[in-house]
Amino acid sequence: MSLSKDQIAQRIAQELQDGFYVNLGIGIPTLVANYIPKNIEIMLQSENGLLGMGEFPTEENVDADLINAGKQTVTTIPGSAFFDSADSFAMIRGGHVDLTVLGAFEVDQNGNIASWMIPGKLVKGMGGAMDLVAGAENIIVAMTHANKHGVSKILKDCSLPLTGVNCVKKIVTDLAVMELRDGKYHLLERAPGISVEEIQQKTEAELIIEGEIPEMIFQ
Amino acid sequence: MAGLDKVVSTYDEALAGITDDMLLMVGGFGLCGIPEGLIQKVSDSGAKGLTCVSNNAGVDGFGLGKLLEKRQIKTMIGSYVGENKLFEELFLSGEMEVILTPQGTLAEKIRATGAGIPAFFTATGYGTQVADGKETREINGKMYVLEEAYPKADFALVKAWKADRHGNLVFRKTARNFNSMIATAGKITVVEVEEIVEPGELDPDHIHVPGIYVNRVIKGEFEKRIEQRTVKKA
């Protein structure tokens, strides 16, 4: 079975390390916050100006002055900090955020990512995505491996307008965990019950398969 | 107004001098931390042909959406702008020009404007259409795009939580967002606040924007509409 959105998030949460400052994009990445291991300490950065984002508020605690980058009402955790947008992107551009998780329409073997614009459809804007991909040392892309017709989104060359170049390091899809090294994707893990053949068939980019590929493990 | 006292009591005074074709910068992220009354006053003024620098463009009928309704914006510069239907129509029909700018670049361009820095290099947008027509340069093995600051805004419209009469500002939570940079980038900076206090009442160590950047302060009333009310069960 291919992974659900929640399972993709759950698998990405295994990449979090104690003491990390993490920026989670909108969509599947946001769900990662629900699976942070209990035994580690993480600070979530929200690029509108908050470090230490907490869970959604109860109805009585809703505060219009306290939102996340998706414009949702949120809360803070003890030890949080507020700052302005210039500071926020100094953290991002300056490489201070340990891990960025974001979604994508397409990635390619050059490490390029396309996530903000589909020509012919209304373009709302890139928000902070271009800054995040340009600044982060460590990026995980959360996406579906292929479109609903089975056509790969892991390409030799992105076909859509780019968000950033040469920045993708690791991708977690509904089928696999893959790492980009020297212009080739290396298959690290597969979703439970998904064959290596299916992953190969749905990956247009150059794919390296070495030895036995383990299934992902969910606690 | 006298001496360092920046407080004005009417919106007419707050936006005295606004005319067609001006460059405005407007604080806020989504609907959080927007100068609601000042935007209403721009709408009432009927000023047209405006260029607006603001991260977002409001929603239908609220925030900058009010200026869209009256076709007052000629050029919109922001990072994420499609949260209203009217915006879509004006954009697709070509009635309004839209310049999409990465959020961090937008913030830094505004900061640079206020700080007297004409341009800066950033990796953001390199290799994308954002870099089209811009100078690029390799520095220490990495490619960067030259981004220019904006001209100073004819009016910088800011929302703060508290101000003292000298225009020293304190923001609240994530309503700070673009407001603190925009406050520095105006020929005339107007700040709409929830509370005005006397000089000396704000702890100098806790001031987010010093009053030197601020020209006018007005006490406003705020609806503080929420775009995405998300709650957990109690």
Image (cartoon, coloured by chain):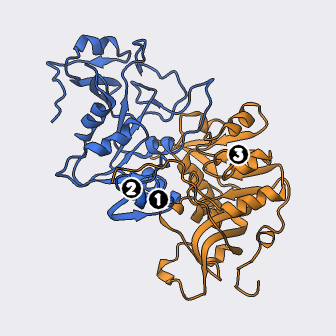
Chain A: drawing colour: blue
- Dot 2, how many residues are within 10 Å of its Cα: few (below 14), some (14-19), or many (20+)? many
Percent of width and height locating residue A22: 34, 49
- Label 2: chain? A
Percent of width and height locating residue A84: 51, 61
Q: Determine the image quadrant of residue A170.
A: top left
Residue plotted at (60% across, 47% down): B146
Q: Which numbered marker is on residue A57? A: 2
Q: Are marks 1 and 2 in contact (CB under 8 Å)?
A: yes
Task: Provide the secondary structure element on which disc 2 rests.
Answer: loop
Percent of width and height locating residue A132: 45, 44
Image depth: mark 1 or mark 2 in front: 2
Q: Which residue is mark 3?
A: B76
Q: How many marks?
A: 3
Image depth: mark 1 or mark 3 in front: 1
Separation of marks 2 and 3 at Cα, in angstroms: 33 Å
Amino acid, disc 3 = Met
Q: Which residue is mark 1?
A: A66
Say yes or no: labels 2 and 3 on the same chain: no
Q: Relative to B166, is A195 above or below? A: above
Task: Provide the secondary structure element on which disc 3 rests.
Answer: strand
Chain B: drawing colour: orange
- Label 3: chain? B
Image depth: mark 2 or mark 3 in front: 2
Q: Nearer the viewer, residue B112 or B102?
A: B102
